[in-house]
Image (spheres, helix red, strand yellow):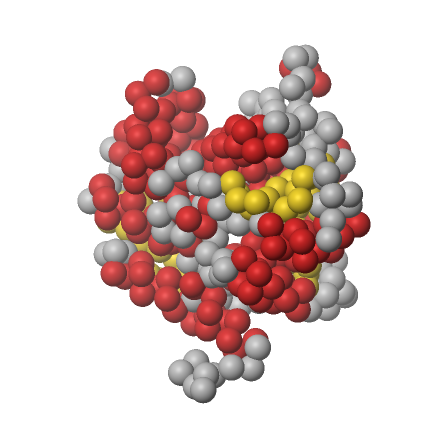
């Protein structure tokens, strides 16, 4: 690890919430007091042993952490190159990494006296995690979800409603994650007194990108210890899928100062990174702009209007990316690539048949890049990818894409 703080990649953001030219706080005057209050509460919590004691107790006894680090032996043999490890965060309670962060935010909300929690969700995993923790603590929960995503993520919609949450379909725009976040922000402006906005990724106005990252960093901290126990050293390459980018930052952050560790983020390439923008690869095909309270890379036209992205994966279907990822991209500490829907579906199927693990479509993108990269590397090279979600929620989408009719598999 680097000892000189001025050379560390782990000291950001600055006091204005900036990671280099990215991040910041671009919000209405109505929201600014809430943002500042949240920042103050989180700064207190960071050095409060009782806060982390509660978090660690819930991570252990409610979420089921630490999640396993799994050597994918059959996949490794099939690819014929580097050793492939999977960080099994899909085994968390609720089936994804999202609950790591939700617990932290809702503990903060309770400390601030908030009784109503709102959230946005794309694939539904953040919505399910938020509804779950609200049920545990007896808090009112409202989840905004794009109407298109409500349709393609029906199992998670039902789970949220079972947990007592109100799910609000958003029909504006294309009815996806961007539009859900827009409506959640409008709700927050209207209900400032009793409402806490639980953001699901490392985006939004400061302090959200850093705060969500810090809660998700439990992933990378565990990997450091588990990889040392398994191999006696750090991994050579880390790979994770990126929509907004919270699972990826959670894995990457504890390794940023280990310059010998390669870091690769995998964006949703949709139908291919092309002029028609039939993808959600913001770093590959976008440029800097402002959306949802922060400056980052976005898919936009020549006039700065935000474009509608496209991906088979609802959780990656977002036309922007977290500002810390934008910064890591610009300074070259991390590399970002894209994977198409077709490639992700191939990885999904291979993981099922070789490892007996049904992955979500989000980490299927990361796995698809593993499939490209591993055969080119020596057998002593170690890859660790984040299996950040399980695929129960995606079976209808995958069945349709593969030409099956649910209920007619004879």
Q: Is residue 389 left or right of residue 343?
A: left
The residue closer to the viewer here, 147 or 363, is 363
Direction from residue 279 to residue 134 in the image, left or right: left
Q: Using the image, determine if residue 75 lies above or below residue 402.
A: above
Q: Is residue 283 visible?
A: yes
Query: Which residue sits at x=67%, y=17%?
Result: 2
Residue 185, given in percent of the width and then of the height, sits at 43, 49
Q: Residue at x 66, y 13 (%)?
A: 3
Q: Residue 90 or 281: which is nearer the viewer? A: 90
- Residue 281 visible within the image: no
Q: Position of residue 297 (x, y in %)?
A: 67, 47
Quarter in which the C terminus is drawn: bottom left
Q: Quadrant of residue 153?
A: bottom left
For the point 39% across and 46% down, the residue is 92
Can you say whether 341 is above or below 131 in the image? below
Residue, x 50% and y 71% (percent of image)?
Answer: 397
Closer to the camera, 303 or 407?
A: 407
108 lies left or right of 402: left
- Locate residue 408, reporting x and y percent: 43, 86
- Work out which quarter of the rendered image holds the N terminus and state it: top right
Query: x and y percent of residue 372 in the render?
Result: 73, 55
Residue 180, quarter of picture: bottom left
């Amino acid at each position: 690890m680097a000892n000189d703080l001025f050379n560390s990649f782990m000291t950001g953001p600055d006091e204005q919430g900036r990671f280099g030219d990215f991040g910041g706080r671009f919000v209405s005057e109505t929201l600014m007091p809430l943002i500042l209050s949240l920042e103050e509460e989180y700064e207190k919590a960071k050095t409060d042993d009782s806060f982390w004691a509660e978090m660690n107790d819930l991570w252990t006894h409610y979420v089921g952490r630490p999640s396993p680090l799994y050597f994918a032996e059959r996949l490794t043999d099939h690819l014929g190159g580097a050793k492939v490890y999977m960080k099994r965060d899909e085994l968390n309670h609720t089936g994804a990494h999202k609950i790591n962060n939700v617990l932290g935010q809702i503990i903060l909300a309770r400390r601030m006296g908030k009784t109503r929690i709102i959230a946005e969700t794309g694939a539904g995993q953040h919505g399910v995690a938020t509804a779950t923790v609200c049920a545990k603590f007896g808090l009112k929960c409202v989840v905004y979800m794009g109407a298109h995503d409500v349709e393609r993520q029906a199992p998670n919609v039902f789970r949220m409603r079972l947990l007592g949450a109100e799910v609000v379909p958003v029909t504006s725009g294309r009815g996806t994650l961007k539009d859900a976040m827009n409506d959640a922000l409008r709700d927050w402006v209207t209900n400032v007194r009793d409402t806490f906005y639980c953001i699901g990724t490392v985006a939004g106005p400061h302090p959200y990108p850093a705060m969500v990252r810090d809660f998700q960093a439990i992933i990378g901290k565990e990997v450091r210890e588990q990889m040392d126990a398994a191999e006696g050293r750090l991994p050579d390459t880390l790979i994770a899928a990126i929509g907004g980018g919270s699972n990826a930052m959670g894995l990457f952050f504890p390794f940023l100062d280990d310059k010998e560790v390669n870091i690769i983020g995998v964006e949703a390439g949709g139908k291919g990174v092309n002029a028609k923008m039939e993808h959600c690869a913001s770093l590959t095909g976008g440029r800097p702009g402002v959306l949802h309270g922060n400056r980052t890379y976005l898919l936009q036209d020549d006039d700065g209007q935000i474009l509608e992205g496209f991906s088979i994966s609802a959780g990656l279907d977002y036309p922007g990316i977290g500002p810390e990822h934008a910064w890591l991209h610009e300074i070259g500490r991390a590399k970002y690539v894209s994977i198409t829907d077709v490639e992700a579906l191939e990885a999904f199927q291979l993981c099922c048949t070789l490892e007996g693990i049904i992955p979500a479509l989000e980490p299927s993108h990361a796995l698809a890049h593993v499939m490209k990269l591993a055969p080119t590397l020596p057998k002593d090279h170690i890859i660790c990818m984040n299996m950040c979600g399980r695929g129960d929620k995606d079976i209808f989408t995958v069945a349709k894409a593969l030409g099956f009719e649910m209920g007619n598999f004879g």
